Image (tube, rainbow, N blue to C red):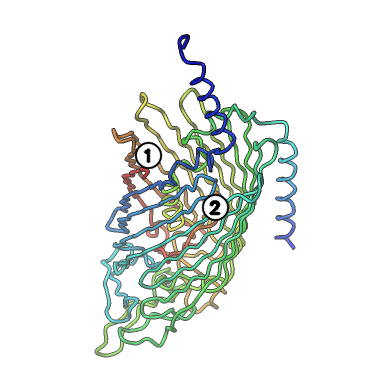
Amino acid sequence: MNRIRIATAGFTVLVALASGCSSMGVEPWERDILAREEMQLTADPVEAAIDDHIYFSKEASSGGRGFGGGGCGCN
Amino acid sequence: MADKDPKSVSAALAAATCSLLGSLPAAPVQAEEEPNWDFNTALLYYGEDNDRVQDLSLNILARRDYLDDRFLTLGLTIDTLTGATPNGAIRQNVPQTFTRPSGSSAYTVPAGELPLDDTFKDTRAAITVGWEQPLGRLWKTGIGFSGSREYDYTHLGLSGSLSRDFNKRNTTVSAGLAVAHDIWDPVGGAPLPFAPMLDVGDTGNKTGSDTKNIVDAVVGITQVVSRRLLVQLNYSLSNASGYLTDPYKFLSLVDGATGDTIPRVPAPGAEGPSHEFRFENRPDERTKHSLYGQAKYYMSGKVLDASYRYMTDDWDIDSHTVDLRLRWPLGEYSYIEPHLRFYTQSEAGFYTISLVDGVELPAHASADYRLGNFDAITAGLKYGWKTSSGSEMSLRAEIYQQNGTIPGELLIGNQVGRETYPDLDAIIVQLSYHFSR
């Protein structure tokens, strides 16, 4: 039950954010800066994967940006 | 132009008209470009102090752009790991002998030292395959496969994602699902829960391999706030079930008054543990919830990348992670990027540093320091530059430090003052090369 409640709350927040966000943003011709490589959310995918793997191996948390990672019996 | 023959002008016009009407280019101009490959490669060195874990890793990520928003991604990682890692036992004022996981020999740790198992040596190969494509004008989908293999561990995973753009593509709502099936085939077999460590050659405390299944679900929203600000918020749910224990970690069985580990004598003529040790046992299910927020902000050439993650799980672990990067251009062709990361976690409910002799065993227990209470900090600097051929290179160097504390109520007798959290200092050096073909 707790899991369902958290998932419902998360979904509600997302919908609220999505509707609140409709007044934000730029016109299509104003995307020059947003299109730059360094402005992408994951600007360096290999470095992001390496960091996720290191911290997955050394800490009790993983994921967040994407899936939880893993796939190793890391010591 | 003035003295040109009017006939030739009209002929040229007719020819131009015919060519416009009769033979329009067969495909958009864009199609004349060849689909291209983009390669992100990196060589990584990760090294911990005191001869603990060292990793040399080669990473290649190739992405083929089909010029119509379809992408194929292929990834390969090879890791070579060596070094020692804390085995879970506490320090003693006398030397301690342990049977190796293989059960075929033993190793001894000097008095007063943190017991480390130096058997750790592995090569890991991992591959990923991904495909992304649009579905109509506003929807996008992706599917992926991942697989990895090490000597004692196999991972197989599938993932799928779906996203839709809204509001002139300023808002993107996405959802993803990933499932994985992992197989542990530990050296010497998977120990039975809380089984005692036995003499060399005696494998009565172990069984064969075991498995775990992982399901991850992520929903998120990405929002363009302004020309210079992009934000993302994700919620993820992860459920792991099956064999979640670390088959190589154990706990010391101690005297309830002194806190010292109970001595043990190997069978006559046999080599074996000098003290009583019990293999750890974790719950066979774990559910994690994470909230992740990220912002990218452009400030006259500089780009700030800031993220925060909160994680909580049903093992009673809560964690907070803050990650900050500032990309600072140095002229047109190079940049530096300082990086700071702060992490803190509380210990798992079943984390302890020893088991008490003569007292009923808890349902679950682990002394794995990664389930303990600690803070970590990463500080680093990256320098990136463009080569004359238009490729990009970067070199980053970082330090990673863990500082933990053992909750006072877990310390018994002589353990007070003797037992400390196995703090960690590591360095990360990475050389990256990014090019297109």
Residue B76 on image: x %, y %? 38, 58
| Amino acid marked by disc 2 | Glu
| Snapshot quadrant of residue B128 | bottom left
Camera sees residue B412 = no
Residue B380: mark in rendering: 1
- Furthest residue toward left: B269
Query: Percent x, y for residue B347?
Result: 53, 58
Can the viewer see residue B39 in this picture? yes
Q: Residues within 10 Å of mark 2 (few under 14, many from 20)?
A: some
Q: In the drawing, does residue B428 fall left or right of residue B143? A: left
Q: x and y percent of residue B42 in the render?
A: 34, 49
- Residue B168: x and y in percent read 67, 35
Residue drawn at x 32%, y 50% as measured from the top left:
B44
Q: Which kind of residue does numbered mark 1 sit on?
A: Gly
Relative horizontal placement of residue B34, taking residue B95 as reference (left or right): right
Secondary structure, mark 1, is strand
Near-viewer residue (A46 or A55) = A46
- As drawn, B342 above or below B204: above
Describe the element under mark 2 as helix, strand or loop: strand
In the picture, the quarter occupied by the C terminus of chain B is top left
Instruction: Give the crowd class for mark 1: few <14, some 14-19, many >=20 residues within 10 Å.
Output: some
Find disc 2 in the rendering and name its residue.
B132
Which residue is at the front of the view, B192 or A4? A4
Residue B188, compared with residue A50, is above or below; it is: below
Instruction: Left or right? Give the position of B144 relative to B138.
Output: left
